[in-house]
Image (tube, rainbow, N blue to C red):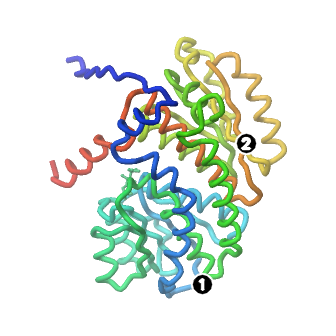
């Protein structure tokens, strides 16, 4: 039997028609994007008074979460690469890696507090005697952490988890700062907030298509398959964030990968089928701190695949510190995904498929 196909024809929204966009955006996703710099400022305070977990010095850190609650862990892992003496692992599932034990710091992150995989991993961390800090806006995770006497970072709720990237990433860094594992986070975060405020003027709804790089990128990606390529240790988690945001906001496929790894496999897969390759739009996320050889690789890679695909865009991170650079690219991707939703006539907020899956699984069907 052939699969059932539901075809819904939506009308593209003019990206300069602010009223039409606001009418489509029932959950106020643009408003939350606009608020990101302020969210980042507030986020730093949420970890300020939380009791520090006992059990250090830690041998490793495991961030456990899913989707919008896991990507902060990936950003932390990338950030930690150059400045942390212990490994950070991101865990997306019901259990924990075998090495996790009493010398592990487990950061259990769930925006809703009700994601079953994260609750499972939290319970596993309790059984293993790991030190735990829970990060959530409420739900069962908050209730369990309170009951268990586990340090709890409470973040404001009422927005989509993926819109809470400031709340779900920066408190983790602040916590590590307070534990003496990293330093200078406040100054770096202040730079990130400043850069975000500058970029907001360029990317927000009021900036017309002719001058707005986020709107222009969305127009390029419309009708195309976005493939986002970053680089290991700099833009890796940001590339993954772009993909997730396009999936969840624009409800469209997108893929990501990193250099140099993709030069050893994915790059070969650009010879067939040509009709699909012609519909791919590549986005290169560039960071001034990319290894010099990786910078060359971006150029050579563009030469190799540039003619086969529909187009290639290169975007450069802004700012001095890694935090500002990561957030600058995240912000562009967030806005691009929202504008792309508008071009598809799709309400960026609701993620009915995720909700349906969660409730079906919860009912045990
Ligand atoms: C929805 C979103 C999802 C959720 C994920 C886990 O906006 O981003 O990826 O983050 O389903 O749910 P939480 O974050 O509540 O643990």
Q: Residue at x 77, y 57 (%)?
A: 320
Q: Quick one: 316 or 204, which is closer to the camera?
A: 204
Q: Which residue is mark 2?
A: 316
Q: Which residue is mark 1?
A: 57
Q: Quick one: 64 or 173, which is closer to the camera?
A: 173
Q: In the picture shown, does residue 325 fall above or below 146? A: above
**Residue 150, quarter of the rendered image:** bottom left
Q: In the picture shown, does residue 53 fall above or below 250? A: below
Q: Is residue 50 found left or right of 238 in the rendered image?
A: left
Taking the image as drawn, is residue 260 in sight?
no
- Disc 2 element: strand
Q: Quick one: 111 or 277, which is closer to the camera?
A: 111
Across and down, in percent, residue 274 comes to 57, 12
Nearer-N-terminus badge (2/1): 1
Q: Is residue 233 found left or right of 300 in the rendered image?
A: left
**Residue 57, quarter of the rendered image:** bottom right
Q: Are marks 2 and 1 in contact (CB under 8 Å)?
A: no
Foreground label between 2 and 1 = 2
**Residue 4, quarter of the rendered image:** top left
Across and down, in percent, residue 50 comes to 48, 83
User: Does the numbered disc 2 mark a residue whose Cβ is under 8 Å from ligand 1?
Assistant: no
- Disc 1 element: loop
Alpha-carbon span between mark 2 and mark 1: 37 Å
């Amino acid at each position: 039997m052939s699969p059932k196909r539901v075809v819904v024809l939506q009308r593209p929204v003019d990206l300069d028609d602010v009223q039409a966009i606001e009418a489509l955006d029932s959950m106020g996703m643009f408003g939350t994007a606009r608020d990101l710099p302020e969210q980042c400022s507030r986020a730093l305070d949420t970890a300020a008074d939380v009791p520090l977990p006992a059990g250090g010095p830690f041998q490793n850190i495991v961030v456990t979460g899913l989707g919008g609650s896991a990507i902060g862990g990936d950003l932390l892992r990338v950030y930690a690469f150059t400045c942390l003496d212990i490994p950070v692992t991101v865990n997306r599932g019901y259990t924990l890696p075998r090495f996790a034990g009493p010398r592990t710091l487990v950061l259990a992150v769930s925006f809703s507090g009700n994601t079953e995989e994260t609750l499972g991993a939290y319970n596993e961390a309790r059984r293993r005697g790991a030190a735990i800090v829970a990060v959530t806006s409420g739900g069962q995770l908050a209730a369990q952490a309170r009951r268990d006497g586990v340090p709890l970072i409470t973040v404001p709720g009422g927005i989509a988890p993926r819109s809470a990237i400031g709340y779900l990433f920066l408190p983790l860094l602040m916590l590590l700062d307070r534990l003496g594992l990293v330093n200078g986070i406040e100054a770096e975060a202040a730079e990130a907030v400043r850069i975000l405020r500058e970029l907001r003027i360029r990317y927000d709804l009021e900036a017309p298509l002719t001058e707005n790089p986020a709107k222009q990128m969305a127009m390029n990606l419309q009708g195309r398959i976005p493939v986002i390529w970053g680089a290991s240790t700099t833009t890796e988690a940001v590339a993954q964030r772009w993909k997730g945001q396009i999936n969840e906001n624009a409800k469209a496929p997108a893929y990501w990968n990193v250099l140099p790894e993709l030069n050893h496999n994915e790059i070969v897969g650009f010879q067939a089928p040509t009709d699909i390759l012609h519909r791919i739009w590549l986005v290169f996320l560039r960071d001034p701190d990319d290894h010099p050889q990786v910078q060359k690789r971006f150029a050579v890679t563009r030469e190799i695949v540039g003619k086969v695909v529909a187009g290639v865009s290169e975007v450069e991170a802004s700012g001095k510190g890694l935090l500002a650079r990561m957030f600058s690219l995240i912000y562009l991707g967030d806005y691009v995904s929202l504008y792309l939703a508008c071009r598809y006539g799709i309400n960026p907020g609701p993620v009915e498929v995720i909700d349906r899956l969660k409730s079906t699984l919860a009912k045990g069907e």
